[in-house]
């Protein structure tokens, strides 16, 4: 992979050769090669100060905010310090110009867009572990000179046969990077080239982000680098909250932050443009590069999922994998059911519904109506022995990203759910509901006690309700609201019926008598074998990605069924119930690996719905919320 | 720098870095004197009116310069700056010029002759031969003379100066006048606008030689068609005239920006002025008088400053693609444009787009390779002012391409366009065809009429619709759809909104401590649709606000010292659930939803969304739902009209179609109304009110709009009648008699019910009278007596009502559980 770097540096000195398109092509081709993308070090796994500046890195992230497009010098004229000759330099994929810009006539202005990206919120530890061990697997050999051993991971990202090349690069690097930094920059060491020198420094930047800088993660307590991603083409195709895998050139030039520092000091009367931007805005839009690196995108790949166990190609392209998994799905499903049943206190029906919920996905929207969502309200959860927390831990083991939201009064009143635009800093301040697609949101209503919700609390509850009913979040832009569609699996655990709307409510029928609950819960085996877990994880992700259809024949029988049911008792089934049954039937088929609805699955869906409803009638709703 | 040949080089640099230092400028240099004079009135404490007057006598009047040529051999080399063709700041009969910081350092642009080489590196730029017509401004192809002449010819038609000496020029007019001039204006605003200024001033003082203005007239072009959307700005727009729309999100404090620095020598007190060029002052290092180096010091209070303000604007939500965050742009407002806009205003800005490289740190050789961009505002146009004033047709017009209009017209020509459109509305919701048709007509709205001369004020043109029905019959979904369809829609829930949230409230701005009127959903949806879900859960005080809005279409506010009346010409689409969880078919609409009849009568159409419970319907419903779940996107696209087409269709009809009643249609309406009155008159009750007639007219007009017809014809009236009848059938049928009874909606009680109440009251009175002289009776006892006597079942409510009726007659009073006779 080193030749790529050479390629880039070589071609950058020759800006008019149309190299840009070629280079991007080159990268795309190489990344398509088998496992090639695993060679590229990932910002998610490797601490920033172990990465070479101006090298190719990848980053798995969510677009948290979009900044304004910026104009930069695409081509500019500079003076070579050694030869004093005028040379044209290329500014693409770079933050800082080299050697001082001369006059403007030869400058070509181009446009690029900046996205503020954060690691995928709520990404579970197992995802991180597996994706970083993937990396280690390829680069297994030890490199003594760069003996970096990250905490989770065993190996350096460098291959030792790269070393020769690297050393030469190291010599080249200080040349360019040093010029960029300037001798007086105090932060120079951070970004500069030599790995050995950096080794002596405490790797603190990642573990303890500077307190003054809020990295704007959607969820509290998140860690990891956030990144300013600079996109050079087709930025209109990206949307807020998209999950991407970005391949790009890392830029950590300390000059970026140095410039920012200077600006604070120089509030000269004659240059009012500089003091126009508020200090907050400065801080947010040009944070120190050591904390928020810049990434110049060569290639960005939208991620349909973030499960590292799945092959990177799409399911359609990978028919061998697809057919092998499909054949196994029914058996894995049975296994998963036996695994989940004891956790749900021996309630097999609830476990079945839980599986359906976990593979649900908003697959389409018909005008305002999201199709395929399946919010599950698990009522009758025991409040002893922190059952819900334990339950969440299981979910966490199964899905790639999830978030536990205890609906305590304090949380509801104080947490920020809905992202809000902060105009003084000119950024979108994130909220807990700014989540990537297919994130499991676990709402623990057993935490809710009696008390007063204040205005913020009411707004938060409304936001949750909107999320569940319409799968959208109205972001607060102060002067107006803007609607962002989302695709979040909401699971509500409550004692009685939840105060939030839900698509489906199931009352947990515990097989365990309350006195033994504590004992039972502590005896549940929460940590199954890794291989089994991986099977479940793969199963859930694949089932979600499958296509689905209904044949005309089955359509007919479904219609007949509906008419018959209505004939018997019009009150028994409404259009809403049919909606739900169609979703249940769809999920049930998919969970069995069937991509089209069969008569059997329809009957089975009807059957489990009937079981569930009969159970519901025993626990008639008390608080009279509209379903 | 004293030889004329070296000037072009110095000039060229002057554009980018610092201009030639005024080292060789003698103290008697006429241009510097002149400039000082004209600026003095704005900057200095002491106005010097005599100075400009003397200048007029000066042979080298800049005005002439501009027409002739710039560098005449006789002038000093650094005269070049002054004799630039854009030295428009000519003092005219005592009227001082005012600098235009919005156009930047325009005076630095010299004129060049087209015949000579375009200024490439260091060639001799200016030719000494003054061919007048061939002269263009350096770097552009703008010829001052022709440009000015053209503009004068154009302006002749429009000129009239009122109030501020500012002439706003619609660029579209310029374009229709002369396309070439327009192109120049767009591409070289920095040069062309000062030329316009010059032209208009010459013209003005020619016509009104005696008038005194505060400063010279400034031309402000607006409505440049170059760019409409902030998102489309790209590097090609730099230094061009653009118009973008957006919303103000922040304004900065006022910033005094230095225009001209005043330097004084500490040794000999010689003073000199240096103009600020792009934020920089070239500080003179040597005093020209005494040749002392570094002796000059700046004197702040004799320097010239101008007002400047940073305004941040953000894309308006309508212009944005889904799923992206709005872009922001910095705008600098200068002089009197400062404080013209407030955060929250929606504005169209015309200005020059600028990109400035990030300033290099002097000690560092590296620069961030990024430019800072901003717009120097020339003209602000608020687009939301019409909420307070009348309709602004200019801003409201949505532009359609020829093709689009053609498509829409083809669609309108189809005979079944009405059905097509109504089925395209919320395709995911099954059937309810009449409701969809009603909503469709609501989206189009009636024709706006003005009766303010006759004292009636505005006639409501908007159709209000109420949907009632069982929970879970996709009422909310329908509302959501409409809210997403219309550009000015608002969605609120009766449960969550207070009267304040619906109307307007006064807020103190935390920064400026200024009171700001914040408008609520009803005002925000002016000219749009306000969707109110859970209408029944609204508190009484909130609902009462709607009374005014739904008929008078205004909103009066008297709060915190602000008394005003806002327009709220909004259509209300509301949804209400029955008080009991299920709709009770044995009760009237009023009894089911418990809304005051005063409010209900303001709805043109009230629909019931009930579960029809019949087999054929069930089958169709099932089919619809199943297909919803498995049909691919493409199939759906084919089946239904695109939402975008529908949106454009509605926007087009609302803007351009304004139907009037035809003779036959009026006759049909009259007949319909008379018929409606007749129904009731047989039974001795009123069955229709003028409000119903108005509703009919509105609906008929809306239907004509659907057909893109300028005339309301009989078929429109027929459909209006049909729809109105359907809605009435659903909502105003008296469950006791099975007749449609409009009084259920207008008075809250069906005629039979009222009759019955009277009967019971009379029976009760008789009963009491029969009991003889007993001053007090037990409530329960009386009820049982009455029940025993009457052949019909007497409910407790009925009994209460009867008691109340008698109490109103002052016959008795009810206190607790006892009934006392009066008199």
Image (cartoon, coloured by chain):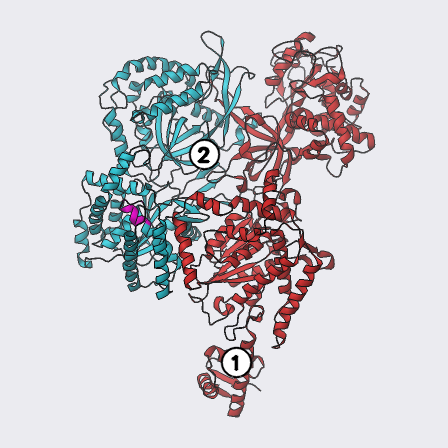
At x 34%, y 13%, the residue is A171
Which mark, by number, is residue B638?
none
Chain A drawn colour: cyan
Magenta range: A586-597
Tell me: residue A477, above or below residue A59: below
Left/right placement of residue B699 relative to residue A435 reads right
Number of numbered discs visible in the structure rendering: 2
Say whether residue B103 is magenta: no
Question: Along the line of sight, which residue is nearer the eye, B276 or B459?
Answer: B459
Tell me: residue B735, above or below residue B470: below
The disc numbered 1 marks a residue on which chain? Answer: B
The disc numbered 2 marks a residue on which chain? Answer: A
Chain the render paints red: B
Which mark, by number, is residue B802?
1
Tell me: residue B696, above or below residue B4: below
Quadrant where the C terminus of chain A is found in the figure: bottom left
Left/right placement of residue B534 relative to residue A386 reads right
Q: Image quarter for residue B234?
A: top right
Q: Are marks 2 and 1 in contact (CB under 8 Å)?
A: no
The residue tagged 2 is: A237
Question: Could you tell me which secondary element the residue under label 2 belongs to?
Answer: helix
In front: mark 2 or mark 1? Answer: 2
Q: Please, which residue is most extreme toward the front here?
A: A553
- For residue B365, say whether it is visible: no
Q: Position of residue B289 (x, y in %)?
A: 68, 12
Q: Image quarter for residue B473?
A: bottom left
Q: Position of residue A585 (x, y in %)?
A: 32, 51
Question: Could you tell me which secondary element the residue under label 1 belongs to?
Answer: helix
Say whether residue A591 is magenta: yes
How far is the residue under mark 2 from the one under mark 1?
70 Å
């Amino acid at each position: 992979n080193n030749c790529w770097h050479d390629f880039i540096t070589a071609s950058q000195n020759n800006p008019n050769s149309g190299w840009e398109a070629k280079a991007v092509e080159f990268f795309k081709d190489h990344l398509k090669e088998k496992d090639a993308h695993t060679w590229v070090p990932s910002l998610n796994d490797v601490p920033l100060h172990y990465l070479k500046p101006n090298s190719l890195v990848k980053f798995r992230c969510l677009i948290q905010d979009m900044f304004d497009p910026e104009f930069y010098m695409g081509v500019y004229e500079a003076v070579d310090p050694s030869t004093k000759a005028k040379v044209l330099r290329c500014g693409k994929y770079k933050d800082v110009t080299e050697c001082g810009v001369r006059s403007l006539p030869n400058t070509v202005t181009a446009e690029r867009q900046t996205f503020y990206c954060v690691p995928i919120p709520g990404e579970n530890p197992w995802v991180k572990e597996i994706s970083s061990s993937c990396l280690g697997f390829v680069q297994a050999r030890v490199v003594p000179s760069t003996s970096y051993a990250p905490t989770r991971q065993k190996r350096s990202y460098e291959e030792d046969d790269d070393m020769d090349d690297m050393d030469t690069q190291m010599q080249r690097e200080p040349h360019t990077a040093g010029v960029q930094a300037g001798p007086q920059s105090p932060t120079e060491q951070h970004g500069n080239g030599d790995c050995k020198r950096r080794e002596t420094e405490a790797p603190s930047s990642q573990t303890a982000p500077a307190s003054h800088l809020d990295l704007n993660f959607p969820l509290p307590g998140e860690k990891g680098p956030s990144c300013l991603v600079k996109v050079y083409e087709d930025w209109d195709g990206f949307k807020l909250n998209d999950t991407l895998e970005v391949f790009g050139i890392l830029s950590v030039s300390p000059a970026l932050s140095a410039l920012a520092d200077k600006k604070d000091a120089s509030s000269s009367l004659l240059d009012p443009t500089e003091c126009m931007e508020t200090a907050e805005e400065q801080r947010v839009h040009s944070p120190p590069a050591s904390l928020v690196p810049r990434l110049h995108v060569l290639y960005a790949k939208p991620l349909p999922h973030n499960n590292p166990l799945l092959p990177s190609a799409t399911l359609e392209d990978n028919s061998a994998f697809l057919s092998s998994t499909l054949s196994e799905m029914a058996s894995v499903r049975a296994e998963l059911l036996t695994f989940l049943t004891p956790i749900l206190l021996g309630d097999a029906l609830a476990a079945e519904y839980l599986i359906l919920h976990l593979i649900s996905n908003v697959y389409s929207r018909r005008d305002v109506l999201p199709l395929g969502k399946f919010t599950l309200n698990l009522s009758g959860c025991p409040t002893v022995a922190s059952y819900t927390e334990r339950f969440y831990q299981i979910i966490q083991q199964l899905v790639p990203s999830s978030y536990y939201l205890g609906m305590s009064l304090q949380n509801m009143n104080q947490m920020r759910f809905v992202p809000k635009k902060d105009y003084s800093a000119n950024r979108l301040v994130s909220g807990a509901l700014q989540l990537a697609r297919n994130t499991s949101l676990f709402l623990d209503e057993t935490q809710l006690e009696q008390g007063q919700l204040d205005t913020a609390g009411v707004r938060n509850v409304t936001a949750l309700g909107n999320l569940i009913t319409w799968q959208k979040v109205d972001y607060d832009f102060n002067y107006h609201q803007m609607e962002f569609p989302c695709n979040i699996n909401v699971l509500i655990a409550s004692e009685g019926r939840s105060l939030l709307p839900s698509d489906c409510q199931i009352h947990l029928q515990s097989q365990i008598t309350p006195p033994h609950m504590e004992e039972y819960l502590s005896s549940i085996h929460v940590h199954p074998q890794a291989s089994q877990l991986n099977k479940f994880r793969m199963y859930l992700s694949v089932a979600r990605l499958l296509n689905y259809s209904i044949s005309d024949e089955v359509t007919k029988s479904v219609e007949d069924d509906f008419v018959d049911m209505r004939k018997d008792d019009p009150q028994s089934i409404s259009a809403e119930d049919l909606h739900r049954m169609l979703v249940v039937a769809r999920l049930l088929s998919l969970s069995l690996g069937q991509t089209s609805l069969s008569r059997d699955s329809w009957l089975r869906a009807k059957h489990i719905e009937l079981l569930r409803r009969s159970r519901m009638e025993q626990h008639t709703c008390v608080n009279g919320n509209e379903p | 720098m004293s030889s004329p040949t070296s000037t072009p080089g110095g000039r060229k640099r002057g554009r980018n870095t610092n201009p030639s230092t005024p080292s060789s400028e003698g103290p008697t240099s006429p241009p510097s004197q002149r400039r000082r004079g004209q600026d003095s009135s704005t900057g200095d404490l002491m106005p010097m009116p005599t100075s400009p007057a003397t200048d007029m006598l000066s042979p080298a009047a800049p005005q002439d310069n501009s027409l002739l040529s710039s560098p005449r051999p006789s002038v000093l080399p650094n005269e070049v700056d002054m004799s630039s063709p854009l030295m428009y700041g000519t003092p005219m009969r005592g009227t001082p010029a005012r600098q235009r910081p919005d156009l930047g350092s325009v005076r630095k642009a010299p004129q060049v002759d087209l015949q000579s080489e375009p200024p490439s590196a260091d060639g001799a730029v200016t030719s000494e031969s003054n061919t007048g017509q061939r002269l263009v401004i350096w770097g552009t192809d703008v010829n001052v003379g022709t440009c000015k002449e053209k503009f004068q010819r154009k302006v002749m038609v429009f000129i009239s100066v009122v109030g501020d000496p500012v002439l706003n020029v619609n660029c579209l007019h310029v374009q229709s006048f002369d396309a070439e001039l327009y192109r120049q204006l767009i591409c070289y605003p920095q040069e062309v606008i000062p030329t316009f200024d010059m032209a208009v001033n010459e013209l003005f003082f020619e016509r009104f030689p005696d008038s005194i203005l505060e400063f010279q007239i400034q031309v402000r072009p607006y409505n440049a068609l170059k760019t409409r959307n902030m998102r489309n700005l790209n590097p090609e727009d730099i230094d061009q005239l653009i118009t973008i729309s957006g919303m103000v999100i922040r304004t900065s404090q006022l910033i005094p920006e230095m225009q001209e620095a005043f330097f004084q020598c500490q040794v000999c007190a010689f003073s000199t002025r240096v103009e600020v060029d792009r934020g920089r002052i070239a500080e003179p290092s040597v005093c020209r008088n005494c040749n002392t180096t570094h002796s000059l010091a700046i004197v702040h209070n004799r320097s010239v400053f101008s007002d400047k303000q940073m305004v941040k604007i953000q894309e308006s939500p309508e212009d944005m693609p889904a799923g992206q965050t709005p872009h922001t742009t910095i705008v600098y407002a200068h002089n009197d444009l400062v404080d013209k806009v407030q955060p929250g205003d929606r504005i169209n800005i015309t200005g020059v787009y600028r990109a400035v490289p990030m300033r290099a740190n002097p000690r560092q050789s590296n620069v961030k390779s990024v430019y800072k961009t901003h717009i120097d505002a020339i003209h602000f146009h608020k687009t939301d002012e019409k909420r307070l004033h009348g309709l602004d047709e200019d801003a409201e017009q949505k532009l359609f391409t020829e093709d689009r209009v053609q498509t829409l017209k083809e669609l309108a020509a189809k005979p079944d366009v009405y059905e097509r459109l109504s089925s395209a509305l919320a395709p995911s919701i099954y059937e309810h065809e009449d409701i969809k048709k009603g909503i469709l007509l609501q989206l189009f709205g009636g024709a706006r009429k003005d009766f303010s001369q006759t004292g009636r004020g505005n006639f409501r043109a908007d159709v209000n619709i109420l949907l009632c029905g069982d929970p879970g019959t996709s009422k909310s979904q329908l509302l959501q759809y409409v809210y997403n369809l219309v550009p000015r829609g608002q969605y609120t829930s009766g449960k969550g909104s207070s009267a304040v949230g619906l109307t307007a409230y006064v807020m103190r701005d935390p920064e400026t401590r200024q009171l700001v009127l914040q408008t609520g959903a009803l005002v925000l949806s002016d000219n749009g649709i306000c969707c109110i879900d859970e209408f029944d859960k609204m508190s009484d005080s909130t609902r009462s606000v709607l009374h005014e809005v739904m008929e008078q279409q205004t909103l009066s506010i008297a709060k915190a010292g602000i008394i005003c009346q806002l327009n709220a010409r909004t259509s209300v689409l509301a949804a209400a659930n029955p008080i009991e969880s299920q709709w009770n078919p044995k009760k009237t609409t009023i009894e089911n939803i418990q809304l005051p009849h005063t409010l209900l009568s303001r709805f043109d159409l009230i629909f019931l969304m009930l579960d029809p419970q019949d087999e054929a319907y069930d089958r169709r419903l099932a089919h619809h739902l199943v297909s919803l779940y498995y049909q691919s996107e493409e199939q759906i696209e084919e089946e239904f009209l695109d939402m975008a087409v529908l949106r454009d269709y509605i926007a087009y009809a609302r803007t351009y179609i304004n139907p009037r009643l035809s003779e036959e249609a009026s006759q049909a309406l009259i007949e319909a109304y008379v018929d409606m009155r007749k129904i009731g008159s047989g039974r001795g009750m009123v069955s229709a009110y003028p409000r119903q007639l108005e509703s009919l007219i509105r609906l008929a007009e809306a239907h004509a709009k659907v057909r893109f017809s300028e005339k309301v014809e009989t078929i429109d009236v027929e459909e209006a009648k049909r729809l109105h009848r359907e809605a009435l059938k659903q909502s105003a049928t008296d469950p006791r008699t099975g007749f449609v009874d409009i009084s259920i909606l207008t008075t809250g009680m069906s005629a039979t019910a009222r009759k019955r109440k009277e009967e019971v009251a009379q029976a009760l009175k008789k009963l009491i009278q029969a009991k003889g002289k007993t001053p007090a009776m037990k409530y329960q006892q009386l009820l049982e007596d009455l029940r025993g006597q009457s052949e019909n079942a007497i409910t407790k409510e009925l009994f209460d009502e009867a008691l109340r009726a008698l109490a109103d007659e002052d016959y008795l009073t009810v206190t607790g559980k006892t009934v006392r006779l009066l008199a």
